[in-house]
Amino acid sequence: MDSNLTVSAGDTAWVLVSAALVMLMTPGLAFFYGGMVRRKNVLGILMQCFACLAIVSLIWIIYGYSLAFGKGNGFIGNLEWAFLKGVGAEPNPDYAATIPHGAFALFQMMFAIITPAVLLGSYVERVKFSAFVLFIVVWTTLVYIPICHMTWAAGGLFRNMGVLDFAGGAVVEINSGIAGLVGALYLGYRLGVKQPSLHNIPFVILGGAILWFGWFGFNAGSALACNSVAVNAFLTTNTAAAAAAVGWAALEWALTGKATMFGTITGAVAGLVAITPAAGFVDVSASIIIGVVVSLLSYFAVGYLKPKLGYDDSLDVFGVHGIGGFWGMIATGLFAQKYVNSAGADGALYGNPAQLGIQLKVALMTVVYCAVGTWIACLVVDKLLGFRVSPEEEVMGLDLTQHHERAYTIID
């Protein structure tokens, strides 16, 4: 370790606060999703999100961080840092030169937690809780950790290719979106419903607002320092979310005659997704374009592509996160500027078309690896435990059949 490295109290405080903000996003996601399911399944989705928080935290400590960021090969790390052995107060110059290595590991833990929580929205209301727990362990190990290593770790395959992924366009968004689509295709339709059956829109709005708030830690915290890049990421994050919210509402208004609250908050989340890989590499004018374009793409994916192709992505994980993340990776290759972040690269619109090619290649490689790995994870879980609840349990609802609880009690 370089003895000349000095821990910055300000940078450390910002990263720890950002980690807390990203942690808050998982309960926020629980409410966001919880309002979209039927009343008989709301505790089921809350339980699954909180299970991700607990289970992935332990995976990350025991072996996940070491495999994701340890020195191994281009595909996966090693177990040198298992149980965070050797990950302590000194900075690691491969990742962040002004904060303790432990703070970096903690911050990255929150990304590992929320990614499987996002994808579970695609197959809600029909999965055994025991199967879900096993799936999270298998999927995090088989899919998330290798993609994280390839993208962000020193010596990782995608990082060595020169990919720009500031806060997880491939690692979190494409990964969760494609995994969600594969899970939905594997499990098939829910019984009796093919569209989100919103039982509590205020829950959705509350969850969406918490996600927007937490996303400042997600993106601006990924600067790993309290500096101008963090400020830029904060600004572009808010601007893209606002532009996408306005874009979705305007499109909905033009096509249906009404702008809905549900559509507006969905648009905002799509904007947050799309700006994720780009936040620390593009300027604020580009973030407006990124937000407006993703509102069009995700609206089309949710409103037209899903009904046309006939898959039951229950809460539109693919349409928002998969499509939004893919567009965000491409947009980074178009709009990135070294003027914004000297550690990045210029994009195609600023004299470097090769960057667009790198972004596209990594996005496609992520799609393929995630799709194959997720299908394998589904097969493993299905063979060992059976993935789906019985028809009788599905009709009764997951709250009672999986957790023996009710979200709402009627008092006479």
Image: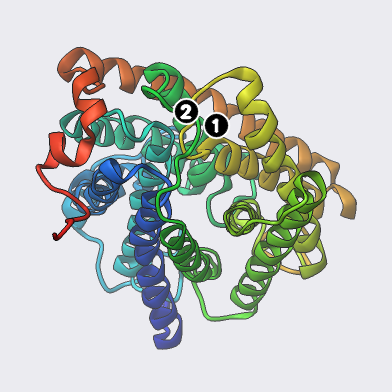
Q: Amino acid at mark 1?
A: Thr
Q: Is residue 287 visible?
A: yes
Front residue (pair 302, 377): 302
Residue 76 point in image, percent of width and height: 38, 35
Name the residue furthest top: 383
Residue 138 percent across, percent down from the top left:
26, 30
- Residue under label 2: 370
Q: Is residue 1 visible?
A: no
Relative to 347, is 400 on the left or the right? Answer: left
Asked if residue 269 is positioned above or below residue 185 in the image, the reply reads below
Task: Identify the coloring.
Answer: rainbow
Return the residue nearer the eye: 123 or 226: 123
Q: Is residue 393 left or right of residue 256?
A: left
Q: Amino acid at mark 2?
A: Cys
Q: Is label 2 in contact with label 1 (beta carbons under 8 Å)?
A: yes
- Is disc 2 surrounded by few (<14), some (14 to 19) or many (20+) residues within 10 Å? many
Query: Could you say which quadrant of the image residue 133 lies in?
Result: top left
Query: What residue is at 45 percent from the left and 81 percent from the top?
Result: 11
User: Is the C terminus in the top left, top right, bottom left or bottom right quadrant?
Assistant: bottom left
Residue at which label 1 appears: 366
Which residue is rendered at x = 27% and y = 48% of the image?
Answer: 52
- Say what secondary structure mark 2 lies in: helix
Measure the alpha-carbon separation of dots 2 and 1: 6 Å
Label 1 crowd (10 A; few <14 / some 14-19 / many >=20): many
Above or below, 107 relative to 397: below
**Quarter of the figure with residue 141:** top left
Q: Nearer the viewer, residue 267 or 377?
A: 267
- Quarter assignment of residue 203: bottom left
Q: Position of residue 318 (x, y in %)?
A: 55, 35
In the image, is 48 to the left or to the right of 239? left
